[in-house]
Image (cartoon, helix red, strand yellow):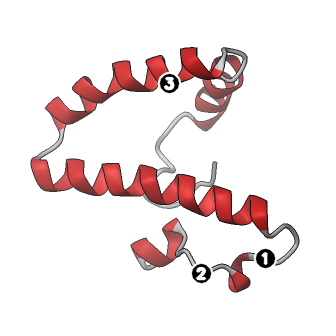
């Protein structure tokens, strides 16, 4: 998890603690947790922002898999854009 000016206001230590605890759950439990969060997120975002959110989650997974399959190659060698590129950071 990285920080940026957009996320500086968040309680990063608490988020990291929650992630650490959540990652102790089985993969099926974590998937259920994510699915349980979706309705609340969808309710609070306009349709276009929700679609961007879904795209960001998909991109995060693709980027992670790409990094796993090419260890040591670094960001510059990857084909899938990262959040920084997508957001123009």
Q: Is residue 48 above or below residue 20?
A: below
Label 2: how many Cα within 10 Å (few below 14, some 14–19, many 20+) = few
- Residue 44 horizontal/vertical position (percent): 17, 34
Tag 1 secondary structure: loop
Q: Is residue 89 visible?
A: no
- Residue 17 horizontal/vertical position (percent): 68, 24
Q: Residue at x 46, y 18 (%)?
A: 33
Q: According to the image, label 1 marks what residue? A: 74
Q: Earlier in the sequence, mark 2 or mark 3?
A: 3
Q: Earlier in the sequence, mark 2 or mark 1?
A: 1
Q: For the residues marked 2 and 3, what is the alpha-carbon distance in whole angstroms? A: 27 Å
Q: Is residue 77 above or below residue 39?
A: below
Q: According to the image, label 2 marks what residue? A: 79
Q: Nearer the viewer, mark 3 or mark 1?
A: 3
Q: Residue at x 62, y 23 (%)?
A: 27
Q: For the residues marked 2 and 1, what is the alpha-carbon distance in whole angstroms? A: 11 Å
- Residue 34 horizontal/vertical position (percent): 44, 26
- Residue extending furthest bottom? 76
The quadrant holding residue 32 is: top left
Q: Residue at x 43, y 79 (%)?
A: 88
Left or right of residue 67: residue 46: left
Q: According to the image, label 3 marks what residue? A: 31
Tag 2 secondary structure: loop
Which numbered marker is on residue 5? none
Q: How many numbered discs, if any?
A: 3
Label 3: how many Cα within 10 Å (few below 14, some 14–19, many 20+) = few
Q: Are marks 2 and 3 in contact (CB under 8 Å)?
A: no
Q: Is residue 45 above or below residue 11?
A: below
The quadrant holding residue 78 is: bottom right
63 or 84, which lies in front?
63
Q: Earlier in the sequence, mark 3 or mark 1?
A: 3
């Amino acid at each position: 998890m990285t920080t940026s000016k957009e996320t500086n206001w968040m309680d990063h230590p608490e988020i990291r603690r929650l992630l650490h605890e959540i990652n102790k759950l089985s993969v099926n439990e974590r998937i259920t947790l994510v699915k349980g969060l979706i309705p609340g997120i969808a309710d609070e975002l306009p349709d276009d922002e929700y679609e961007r959110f879904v795209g960001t989650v998909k991109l995060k997974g693709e980027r992670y898999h790409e990094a796993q399959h090419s260890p040591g190659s670094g960001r510059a060698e990857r084909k899938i854009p990262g959040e920084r590129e997508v957001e123009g950071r």
